[in-house]
């Protein structure tokens, strides 16, 4: 009798698998609806918003929080717009995709359960066909008991009754389309809010006027018209980028613009190098050079200041005992941050290397890899560079002299306060919690070379094309982690970080800084320069047009030697990011002489000032 029952169950399982396979083959052959653009996208998005509701969110799982603690998998079966859904999920966090159809036609859902066992959060996309599967519903119920599960269901309200027993949050939309896929994915992370309760009653559980509402807490990804800008008015960005590439100011670049908390423009141009074998992608990782100063060192400085662990009026000597008998003893933290401590721009770096300082192979004595087959000896910084920093002259105190040494000293101060390396601190306290997936120092420890943009073909120091090794020589000889340079990231990660700053320290439902701290560090602090604390700012000498002709006097950010910049303009509620590798294959000033970065920035200002004036149908 027992054998007969097992046999019958096996055949029932095989029979259902065949039926579901037929569904899959039919629907995978269906033509996809084209994605609308411009105002048509906005109109459809408004209709989708009115058609989207959220259920079973008593525990406020949606929008997802504590991203650093989540391992997320997205699973789709017969849903036609899964690719778009998954692409939007990955704007917010690392989300691995599982094609459920493979587990129906080739494997089993038991295999899917096994393959997702290390994920603590599952996002399951369902349409009418998937909902008809007892196996799929059973898989969801089994995982709800032990994991975070979110269901995104696209279909008719009449089918909701089949989910009456489900306790997991359900994002429901009865308007299946590419735009609803984008919208629902963003709703999972709070990129868009859920603003509507159910319009009709479909079951005892899912009744009219039931459901949960959420708030927008992260970046939204949309079209310019959604921020009252005509897409056509941003076309000039394409022309300026083309000018840069044709004139060999840079082999390629990525431009991102966010306004009102919405990424409205994000485009890659050109290639990694002039041989044009690898086109630039939105997810490519760039050496940010001095953008590190504000995106890493200043961020940690702000946090420690806010916690009362760092006093801006305190001196280097109060934090670093070795500095007390040098001319650095009484230099104040705020002087370092404003580049008014009188420090020289930099010290000699690779010029002081001796054959015994480097090795072609790694070992305990040569642990620091700063190039391919190029290893630095263990205590080079302590024995050589640290002494040179402490003994360097102080000539121009009180004057503005931009100095990399200022942020090198800041790194030493911060690490003594926290007993934590700079790269570890910012990764744990900012990048991971914010959902920044690419940002960090030493990118080759986490990413393949193919994803990292090459910088200079270094024929003087390391004698190789630099890919994933920091371009800046000082940062390189600090084993790739320095206060002045060494951070790598893609444009989307920088957009997240600086949207947090634009939000006065808030992002994803977390207050990273007090608004007063953001205001202090980003406002003009120096009596002799435009600088804030760590941050560069709009130049009151309007003849310089810095950072661009139309930027407001509230603008703050930083540029990077490798051809990068990030600028935040609170007056226009805008974040502008430009990433390039203008130092490839060799250093060139063309990016600056052609004014590529400010010209693109001004295109955005002109588009904002012109406005859309196209009418929000359905708003």
Image (tube, rainbow, N blue to C red):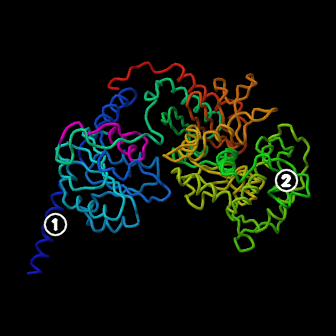
Taking 311 as reference, is 496 left or right? left
- Identify the element where label 1 is drawn: helix
Residue 33 in the image, given as x and y percentages of width and height: 29, 37
Of labels 1 and 2, earlier in sequence is 1
Which labelled disc corresponds to residue 346?
none
- Judging depth in this view, the residue of 181 and 563 nearest the camera is 181
Above or below, 201 against 166 in this view is: above
SS class, disc 2: loop
Question: Percent x, y for residue 567?
Answer: 63, 35
Q: Which residue is mark 2?
A: 348
Q: Position of residue 239 (x, y in %)?
A: 56, 28
Stretch of the chain drawn in magenta: 178-201
Q: Residue at x 73, y 49 (%)?
A: 484
| Residue 35: quarter of image | top left
Marks 1 and 2 in Cβ contact (< 8 Å) = no
Q: Which residue is mark 1?
A: 14
Measuring 38% from the left and 43% from the top, which residue is drawn there? 187
Between the C-alphas of marks 1 and 2, the distance is 72 Å
The quadrant in which the N terminus is found is: bottom left
| Residue 181 shown in magenta | yes
Q: Estimate the x, y position of residue 515 in percent, counting from the top left.
A: 60, 39
């Amino acid at each position: 009798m027992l054998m007969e029952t097992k046999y019958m169950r096996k055949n029932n399982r095989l029979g259902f698998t065949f039926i579901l396979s037929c569904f899959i083959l039919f629907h995978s052959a269906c033509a996809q609806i084209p994605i609308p653009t411009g105002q048509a996208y906005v109109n459809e998005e408004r209709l989708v918003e009115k058609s989207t509701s959220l259920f079973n969110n008593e525990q406020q799982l949606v929008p997802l929080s504590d991203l650093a603690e989540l391992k997320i998998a997205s699973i789709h079966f017969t849903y036609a717009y899964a690719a778009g859904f998954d692409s939007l999920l990955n704007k917010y966090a690392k989300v691995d995709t599982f094609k459920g159809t493979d587990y129906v036609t080739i494997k089993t859902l038991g295999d899917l359960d096994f393959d997702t066992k290390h994920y603590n959060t599952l996002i399951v996309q369902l349409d009418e066909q998937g909902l008809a599967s007892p196996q799929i519903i059973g898989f969801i119920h089994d995982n709800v008991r032990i994991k975070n599960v979110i269901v995104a269901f696209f279909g008719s309200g009449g089918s909701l009754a089949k989910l009456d027993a489900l306790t997991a949050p359900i994002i429901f939309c009865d308007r299946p389309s590419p735009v609803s896929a984008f919208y629902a994915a963003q709703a999972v992370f709070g990129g868009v809010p859920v603003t509507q309760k159910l319009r009709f009653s479909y079951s005892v559980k899912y009744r009219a006027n039931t459901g949960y509402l959420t708030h927008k807490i992260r970046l939204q990804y949309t079209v310019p018209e959604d921020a009252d800008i005509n897409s056509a008015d941003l076309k000039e960005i394409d022309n300026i980028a083309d000018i840069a590439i044709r004139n060999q100011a840079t082999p390629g670049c990525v431009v991102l613009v966010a306004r009102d908390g919405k990424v409205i423009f994000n485009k890659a141009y050109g290639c990694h190098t002039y041989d044009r074998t690898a086109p630039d992608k939105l997810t490519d990782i760039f050496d940010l050079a001095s953008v590190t100063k504000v995106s890493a060192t200043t961020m940690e400085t702000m946090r420690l200041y806010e916690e009362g662990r760092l006093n801006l009026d305190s001196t280097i000597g109060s934090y670093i005992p070795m500095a007390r008998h040098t001319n650095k003893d009484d230099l104040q933290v705020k002087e370092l941050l404003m580049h008014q401590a009188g420090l020289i721009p930099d010290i000699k770096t690779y010029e002081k290397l001796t054959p015994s300082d480097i090795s072609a192979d790694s070992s305990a004595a040569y642990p620091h890899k700063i190039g391919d087959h190029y290893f630095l000896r263990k205590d080079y910084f302590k024995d050589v560079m640290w002494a040179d920093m402490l003994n360097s002259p102080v000539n121009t105190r009180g004057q503005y002299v931009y100095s990399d040494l200022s942020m090198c000293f800041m790194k030493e101060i911060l690490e003594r306060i926290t007993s934590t390396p700079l790269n570890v601190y910012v990764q744990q306290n900012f990048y991971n919690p914010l959902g920044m997936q690419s940002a960090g120092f030493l990118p080759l420890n986490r990413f393949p070379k193919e994803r990292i943009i090459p910088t200079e073909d270094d024929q003087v120091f390391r004698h190789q094309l630099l890919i994933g090794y920091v371009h800046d020589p000082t940062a390189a000889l600090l084993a790739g982690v320095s206060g002045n340079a060494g951070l790598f990231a893609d444009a989307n990660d920088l957009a997240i970080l600086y949207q947090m700053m634009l939000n006065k320290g808030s992002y994803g439902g977390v207050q990273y800084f007090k608004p007063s701290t953001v205001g202090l560090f980003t406002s003009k602090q120096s009596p002799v320069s435009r600088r804030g604390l760590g941050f560069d700012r709009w130049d009151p000498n309007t003849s310089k047009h810095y950072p661009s002709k139309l930027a407001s006097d509230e603008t703050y950010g930083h540029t990077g030697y490798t051809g990068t910049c990030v600028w935040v303009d609170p007056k226009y509620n805008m974040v502008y990011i430009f990433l390039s590798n203008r130092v490839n294959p060799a250093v060139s000033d063309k990016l600056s002489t052609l004014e590529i970065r400010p010209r693109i920035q001004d295109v955005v200002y002109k588009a904002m000032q012109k406005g859309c004036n196209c009418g929000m149908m359905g708003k």
